[in-house]
Amino acid sequence: MANEIVKLTTTQAIVRFLAAQYIEIDGEEVRICGGGFGIFGHGNVTCLGEALWDARDVLPLYRGQNEQGMGFAAAGYAKQWLRRRFMFCTASAGPGTANLLTSAALAHANRLPLLMLCGDTYVTRLPDPVLQQLEHFGDPTLGVNDAFRAVTRFWDRITHPAQVLQSLPAALATMLDPADCGPAFIGLPQDVQGWTYDYPARFFDKRVHRIRRQAADAGELAQARDLLRGAARPMIIAGGGVQYSGATEELTRFAEAHDIPVVETIAGRANLLQHHPLNIGPVGVTGSDSANAIAERADVILAVGTRLQDFTTGSWTAFAPDARIIGVNVARHDAAKHLSLPVVGDARLALAALGDLDGYRAPSDWVDFARDARAEWIVYTDAVTRPGNGPNSYAQAIRVVNDLCHPRDRIVAAAGGLPAEITAHWQTKAIGTVDVEFGFSCMGYEIAGGWGARIAQAEREPERETIVLTGDGSYLLMNSDIYSSVLTGKKLIVCVLDNGGFAVINKLQNNTGLESFNNLIADCPTVPDPFTVDFAAHAAAMGARAETVGTMAEFAETFKRAQTADRTCVIVMKVDAYEGWTTQGHAWWEVGTPHATEHPKVAAAHGEVETGRARQRKGI
């Protein structure tokens, strides 16, 4: 009946609404929400926990070990599903919820859907102050949950059960909006969670959603066509938005139709296969000599689905001062950066709408230059990654994994030195198989994000592997989801490459004239007796199959065994902290250096930084 009502608590209504929301993917209707990650406390176990128990068959709840890890896992899940599905995270009031702040920031920076359902203090304030409540003497409405306003796209606090009728659809719309996608936070006061309301039954009817595809403005497309048709040295930057739009085929067709060289961002790695003749490599600070060589000469740059962060632009020194940028992006904010000619719209539709450009093709000498530069880079990267070429290194380990993994296996890494080495050297075997978290550059994402990616992967390609590459620093920061992966039967292959501390920051420290200090364990003045963690024993204690190896040959054989194992495997190997780094392919990157110092090497490094700044675009 049209006027039928159903009496539910606030949290029962939230859970029932989520369970009724579907999306069509490849002709199949699946729930948008794949379930959730939860750690219960007094702020969410009694009411939200009761509602989730009743929905456990349709919204599976994975028990987390750390709330930050839960958020990372949800981000890894959303990436694997190309933002078309999401997971929720629930935490108790107080520190449990506060632990999600870093995860929310990661999701915000990466434009990822993540729903946080978190406990809050009582609306009535009758029991105030309650356990874990932060009191602000001049503002009783202010609490720790308000901190999430800065790291979410949607924020609300439910102070009456009826508000669910507006808040939940608005949060969902935000998470499904390609232009505004990001995390949503809903604070749930502990008393309001259990209050009831007569909800209209139709609010819980099954609804099938579709991701909006916004067509670009005809005038903006016309301007872009004119600029491209006049280009002598055009280039395409392919970002992560190409994959989220499902536009990899359109990107390839457009590039081939006009013979335009393509470079990839970190988020856009695996937009093109490795051996495509127009794939000129990754661009920017962690890029390739080939991509950066054409970037500094290109006169027209078609930037598709990228937010043009500093590692892509070399802090805005990677491009010629007079280069014109066309920003194709569903988000207006990203499309218009640095006075780009904006083409605001879906990447797939926009690339198709740009059309044949009246038969335009890039000049052959330009394309030949790009391809020759790429060939030279391949020779370099082949040498750097060859096992046995110097001491054990990230690059060599990447080569071993690359050679042995299946094309559809998923690679997960974040922060430290591995993102640069993977971006520079990974040979893409299949589209969309690389997740290098460098939007927020968040240490600790690797294992937790890998667990979330594996949950998503198991829903579509259970026979494939999720392979995590992490350093010892990130491992020590957050490793407990090795236990989560074993508990839930979501197998990972985790490669722990131990270089004795925070080696990439030590490298930056040395490159800016400073002595090694407080990054490598051996260089910490407060450490009287440095020692090495037995990572294999630690991982084995969490239920993983774990081995420590000493050579690249042993690493390869152990990796093969891991591929046939029935549970999470951890492979530990020491790599050199000083040798084996990729020394070529780097664009300039702005870091703050002392303008006054008593140390000559620091002063010299500062001078080099200032020299590099001369090519920096000033927002025009």
Image (cartoon, rainbow, N blue to C red):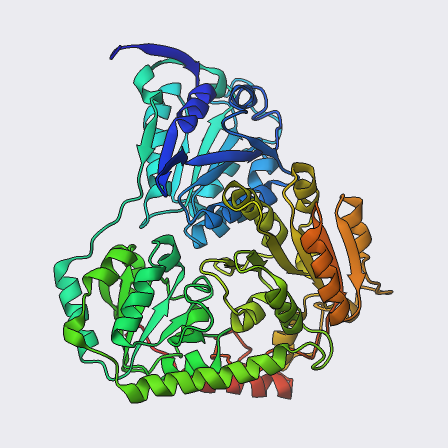
x, y percent for residue 444: 62, 53
**Left or right, 453 with reference to 150:** right
How many numbered marks are there?
0
Q: In this view, does 295 lie above or below 398?
A: below
- Residue sitting nearer the eye, 102 or 353: 353
x, y percent for residue 251: 32, 64
**Left or right, 309 with reference to 492:** left
- Residue sitting nearer the eye, 538 or 462: 462
Q: Residue at x 63, y 73 (%)?
A: 395
Name the quadrant containing residue 16.
Answer: top left
x, y percent for residue 203: 32, 21
x, y percent for residue 606: 54, 83
- Residue sitting nearer the eye, 138 or 577: 577
**Left or right, 113 with reference to 564:** left
Quadrant (top left, top right, bottom left, bottom right) of the C terminus:
bottom left
Q: Is residue 299 visible?
A: yes
Q: Which residue is drawn at 44% across and 50% down?
A: 108
Quadrant (top left, top right, bottom left, bottom right) of the N terminus:
top left
Q: Is residue 136 visible?
A: no
- Residue sitting nearer the eye, 512 or 182: 182
**Left or right, 507 with reference to 610:** right
Name the quadrant containing residue 234.
Answer: bottom left
Q: Is residue 367 above or below residue 191?
A: below
Q: In this view, does 433 lie above or below 209?
A: below
